[in-house]
Structures are given as C-alpha cells and as structure tokens.
Image (cartoon, rainbow, N blue to C red):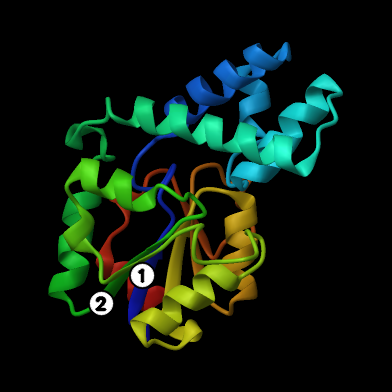
C-alpha cells in the first residue's frame, strides 16, 4: 500500500531548465566554452558541481577545486537572479490538483530534489505548503543515482521506503528510487525512463486511483 508520494522538482512539477541553461550558458561564454542546448541535456538530474565539470570537460579546461567552487557559486547566483522571473503559472498543468487529491486521501507528500534552490522555487510557485517535507541538495552527500535523497525523504515522512512512490524525469532519479526500494513513476520519455514501474508524459496526468496498481 502506497502511503507517500515523493516528487522530484525540475521537470516534474515545473521546468526550471530554461533558467539553468541561461546561467550555464553565461558561465560557459565567460570561460570561452561552446555550450549548446544539446549539451544542456547532459546536465539533467546532475548535481551543480558535476554539471560544471561536464562543461569544463567540453572545453578541455582544468581548474582547481577552489576555482570550481567559485564558478559554481557564480552560476548559482545568476540562476537565482533568473528565477526571479518565475511566476506561479509556470507550474505544470494538473500538478496542483494532483497534490490536493493526494493530501485529501491522507497520502503524505514530499519534494526530493538535488537542487539547492528547491525551497525558493516552491515559494515562487506558491506551493510550499502543499508538501509535508522538502529534501534538497543541501541535505545530502551523495547525488542521484545514489538513493540517499529518497531514503531521507522517507525517514522525514516516517514511512517505509516500500510504501513510497517517486515521480522522476531523469534516468539517474529512476535508478535512485528503485535502489531505495521504492516504486517509481517516470515522467517523460519511455525510452529514457524504461526502468520505471510506469512512464507517463506529465505528472499532472497521473490518476490517484492508479496508486492501487503499483
């Protein structure tokens, strides 16, 4: 029996990819590195530092850990500035209704995102009160596909991992959810998320009656 639903943030509840792309593109340009939309796809579901390393690899640039930390902070500052443009209407269709139905059913709800700006995004969308707990990149040591972030969310919700279902749009996130012993709904492409228990196009399309089928 499913007692909790855990949602990734970017690509599941809202699309912040455009803001990440603007910030990473700005940083790449400053470093003299060509960075395309196709390159940006490689950063999906990846931590900020690993994303930076991928960009540096694209340009064949080698930097010290201190320099990389400074660049990651600079990118995040720009990202937060761009996020200021976000409005509540950017939440994906059907998501708010889904969250409301889950709460009405007594299902616990959490966000588990590798983003360190999850709380900021939820606040801009005016949906922070829709969740029982939020776990973000500041609270974990290991990034997906390590299951740490989902296991922490389950502990905070006081629910057994086997009683949780995760909504994820990245292959690494699906792998992490399954490694945590949870069910997983892939949100996006069946080709990329085929290991999930089920794949849907958009999170807002999920019917709460389908929880019994997992």
- Say few, some or many: other residues with alpha carbon within 10 Å of mark 2 (under 14 / 14 to 19 / 20 or more): some
Quadrant where the N terminus is found in the figure = bottom left
Residue that mark 2 sits on: 107
Secondary structure, mark 1, is: strand
Disc 2, disc 1: CB below 8 Å? yes
* Distance between the alpha carbons at the discs numbered 2 and 1: 7 Å
* Residue 214 seen: no
Q: Horizontal placement of 100 versus 214: left or right? A: left
Quick one: 202 or 6, which is closer to the camera? 6
- Say few, some or many: other residues with alpha carbon within 10 Å of mark 1 (under 14 / 14 to 19 / 20 or more): many
Which percent across, then down, holds residue 21?
A: 52, 24
Q: Does label 2 or label 1 sit earlier along the sequence?
A: 1
Which percent across, then down, holds residue 119?
A: 32, 53
- Label disc, if present, on residue 105 of the rendered structure: none
Quick one: 16 or 120, which is closer to the camera? 120
Q: Which residue is located at x 83 percent, y 25 percent?
A: 61
Secondary structure, mark 2, is: loop
* Residue 58 seen: yes
> Total of numbered circles in the picture?
2
Q: Horizontal placement of 138 versus 204: left or right? A: right
In the image, residue 91 sits, relative to residue 184, either above or below, namely above
Which percent across, then down, holds residue 24?
A: 57, 25
Q: Looking at this view, name the residue that lies furthest to the front.
A: 66
Quick one: 104 or 26, which is closer to the camera? 26
Residue that mark 1 sits on: 5
In the image, residue 154 sits, relative to residue 93, either above or below, namely below
Q: Which residue is located at x 24 percent, y 40 percent?
A: 93
Q: Dividing the picture into quarters, in which one does residue 59 lie?
A: top right
Quick one: 32 or 147, which is closer to the camera? 32
Q: Horizontal placement of 190 versus 62: left or right? A: left
Quadrant where the C terminus is found in the figure = bottom left
Q: Which residue is located at x 62 percent, y 27 percent?
A: 40
């Amino acid at each position: 029996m499913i007692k909790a639903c855990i949602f990734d943030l970017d690509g599941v509840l809202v699309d912040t990819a455009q803001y990440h792309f603007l910030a990473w593109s700005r940083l790449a340009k400053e470093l003299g590195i060509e960075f395309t939309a196709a390159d940006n796809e490689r950063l999906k579901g990846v931590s900020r530092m690993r994303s930076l390393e991928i960009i540096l690899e694209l340009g064949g640039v080698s930097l010290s850990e201190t320099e990389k930390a400074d660049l990651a902070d600079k990118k995040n500052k720009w990202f937060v500035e761009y996020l200021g443009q976000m409005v509540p209407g950017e939440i994906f269709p059907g998501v708010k209704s889904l969250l409301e139905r889950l709460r009405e059913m007594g299902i616990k709800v959490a966000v588990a995102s590798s983003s360190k700006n999850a709380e900021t995004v939820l606040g801009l969308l005016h949906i922070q009160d829709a969740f029982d707990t939020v776990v973000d990149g500041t609270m974990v040591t290991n990034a997906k596909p390590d299951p740490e972030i989902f296991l922490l969310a389950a502990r905070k919700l006081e629910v057994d991992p086997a009683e949780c279902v995760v909504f994820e749009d990245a292959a690494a996130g699906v792998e992490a959810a399954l490694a945590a012993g949870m069910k997983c709904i892939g949100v996006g492409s069946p080709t990329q998320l085929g290991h999930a228990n089920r794949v849907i196009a958009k999170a807002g399309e999920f019917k709460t009656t389908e929880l019994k089928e997992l």
